[in-house]
Structure formats: structure tokens, C-alpha cells
Image (cartoon, rainbow, N blue to C red):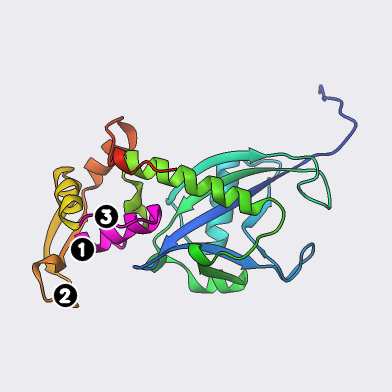
Amino acid sequence: MVHYTHPSRILVALDCIIFGFDGEELKLLLIKRNFDPERGKWSLMGGFLNEQEDLEEAAQRILYDLTGLTNNYLEQLQTFGAVKRDPVERTISVVYYALVNIQQQDINAIKSHNAYWINLSEKPDLIFDHNAMVDQALRQLRYKAALHAIGFELMPDKFTIPQLQKVYEAIYNTQLDRRNFSRKIISTELLIDTGEKDSNSVTKKGKLYKLNADKYQQYLTDYVGFFPELTLS
């Protein structure tokens, strides 16, 4: 068997930036490290690539270990490879970001990793280059959410239009016009009226919808532009 010759060892890690939404604010799932290095500090969830594992498979494994969730929106973001990014050993990190429905999480899995949902606006300082990873992920999320309707990945199975608007306001950290948002979202044909109403609402705004899965797939694959004017820096 032929082998490549290389004088040094370089590790490949994966770090996952996991976004969630609690109905009011965009959140990050972070771990308070109870292991070295940087014990007691905040970081993203990560792990090393196994020898017989594809990158996407490894990212899915890390996401599942932390949240108990599968088949969530998961996208490779960027590779971080500064020579001294990890003080222990030369490590290249392939970064993914994920969007999850907080209501479907496995609470026990999260607790077992000493993980917590933190408001993005209150993000603590993170170890290594994890702050830069989160900044880059947020820029990519804002770009993709304007084009491909991926904000729906953060929603519960049934939701109102005002609740959906709050997701996009949280992603872009800006206030959107209610009537304009409602008109545009209805025109996309992404909503299916469930015939139900939010029990906490006393107005017609409390009508519950669910996602049109077929139409959603079209918005994921076609270059149709969901809300192009929301593409902010």
C-alpha cells in the first residue's frame, strides 16, 4: 500500500455553531468547558474527525450528541487554520452552522455536555477563534435567510405570522413593517393555514400556519430570492 510521507501531525476538528430561537431572541448553544484546555470558559461544541468519517457525517454526529436532533439545517461555513489557533496542538477546524427548533431538543443531552442556550446579544467571550466563527456564521445566516427562507428552520411546527416576523427581526436585529412582512410572506405560498388559532391570541393575527414543505424545498434549491432587501451586513 502506498502512503504519503509527511513529517508532522495535523489534527482535523469540527466546530458547530448552533442557532435557536425562543420566540423572542436568537440564541447560541454554548458549552461551559469542564475539561482542559480552557476549563471553565465558554466555547462552541466541537470534536475531532474520526478516521473513517466524512466531514458532514462528523458534523451531524456532533450536532446529535449535543441536541439529540437529526435532519436539521446544517451548512459548512469555513475552515479556520491559523497555525497557533489551538495552543495545544496544530489543529485545523472545519466549521458548520446549524439551525434547530428549540422545542425539539433533548434536554438531557444538552445538560450532559454542560451546554446552555445564550442570547446572541449576550454572548460571552469564547475561547480560541470561536468569536470569529460566530461572527462569520451570523453574516452567512443573514445572507442565506434573505435568499432561501431558512428562517423557518427555527420555528415550531405551527406558528403565527407575527411569530415568524420576530424570527427575522432577531436574525437581522432590526424592526420590520408588520403589514409589509405579512403581505410578502403570504405571497411566497410557503404558509398552509391549519384552521387553528393560537390560544394566547385574541385577534386574527393569532391564526396558526404550518410550512408548505414542497414550496420550501423550491426556495432552498431555486435562485428565487426570499427577502433580498434583508441582505444586510
Q: Amino acid at mark 3?
A: Leu
Query: Crowding near pointer 3: few (<14 within 10 Å), some, many (20+)?
Result: some
Q: Are marks 3 and 2 in contact (CB under 8 Å)?
A: no
Check if residue 167 falls in the magenta segment.
Answer: yes
Q: Secondary structure at mark 3?
A: loop
Please give the residue where the numbered disc 1 appears in the rendered image: 160
Query: Crowding near pointer 2: few (<14 within 10 Å), some, many (20+)?
Result: few
Q: Which mark is residue 176?
A: 3
Q: Secondary structure at mark 2?
A: loop
Please give the residue where the numbered disc 2 appears in the rendered image: 201
- Locate the C terminus by quadrant: top left
Depth order, front residue of 28/135? 135
Q: Are marks 2 and 1 in contact (CB under 8 Å)?
A: yes
Can you say whether 46 is above or below 9 in the image? below
Depth order, front residue of 148/13? 148
Alpha carbon separation for disc pair 2 and 1:
10 Å
**Residue 151, position as x, y percentages in the image:** 34, 51
Q: Amino acid at mark 1?
A: Thr
* Residue plotted at (26% across, 58% down): 165
* Residue plotted at (18% across, 46% down): 184
- Locate the N terminus by quadrant: top right
Q: Which mark is residue 147?
A: none
Q: Amino acid at mark 2?
A: Ser
* Residue plotted at (57% across, 74% down): 111
N-term-proximal mark, 2 vs 1 = 1
Magenta span: 155-177
Check if residue 196 falls in the magenta segment.
Answer: no
**Residue 42, position as x, y percentages in the image:** 66, 65
Res 63 quadrant in image? bottom right
Depth order, front residue of 206/179? 179
Can you say whether 72 is above or below 223 in the image? below
* Residue plotted at (72% across, 54% down): 128
